[in-house]
Image (cartoon, grey):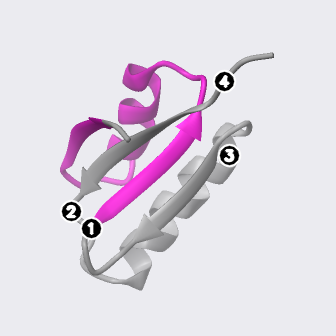
């Protein structure tokens, strides 16, 4: 059984539309659990996918993305 790690990303989201775009992208990936904190511009993703894969997916939102590490 794989253990999902929780990754924290900073995504330059400014509105509900931004977080909606991120939500749609992550839902399409499958096998990811995530939480979005719009005011803090943070996205936490629980997944055993590679960080690069998650990063690339988040960048598809057109927003600036920074990886903060695992929590």
Where residue 43 sits: x, y (%)? 39, 56
Picture residue at 25% right of the left edge, 73% below the top: 40
Asked whether 19 falls inside the magenta stretch, the response is no
Q: Residues within 10 Å of mark 3 (few under 14, many from 20)?
A: few
Question: Which quadrant of the figure has residue 52?
Answer: top left
Badge 2 crowding class, 10 Å Cα cut-off, few under 14, some 14 to 19, many 20 or more, is some
When the figure is inspected, residue 43 is found, relative to residue 48, above or below; the finding is below
Q: Is tag 1's residue or tag 3's residue first in the polypeptide sequence?
A: 3
Q: Are marks 4 and 2 in contact (CB under 8 Å)?
A: no
Distance between mark 4 and mark 2 Cα atoms: 28 Å
* First in sequence: mark 1 vs mark 2: 2
Magenta residues, start to end: 41-69
Q: Nearer the viewer, residue 60 or 13?
A: 13
Earlier sequence position, callout 3 versus callout 2:
2
Q: Front-most of 64 and 37?
A: 37
Which numbered disc, 1 or 3, marks the residue closer to the eye?
1
Q: Nearer the viewer, mark 4 or mark 1?
A: 4
Q: Helix or strand or loop: what does disc 3 sit on?
A: helix
* Nearer-N-terminus badge (3/4): 4
Q: Residue at x 45, y 66 (%)?
A: 36
Q: Are marks 1 and 2 in contact (CB under 8 Å)?
A: yes
Q: Quadrant of residue 14?
A: bottom left
Q: Which residue is mark 3?
A: 28
């Amino acid at each position: 059984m794989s253990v999902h790690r929780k990754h924290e990303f900073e995504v330059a989201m400014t509105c509900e539309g931004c977080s909606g775009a991120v939500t749609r992208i992550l839902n399409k990936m499958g096998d990811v659990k995530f939480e979005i904190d719009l005011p803090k511009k943070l996205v936490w993703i629980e997944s055993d996918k590679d960080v690069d894969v998650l990063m690339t997916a988040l960048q598809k939102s057109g927003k600036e993305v920074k990886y903060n590490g695992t929590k």
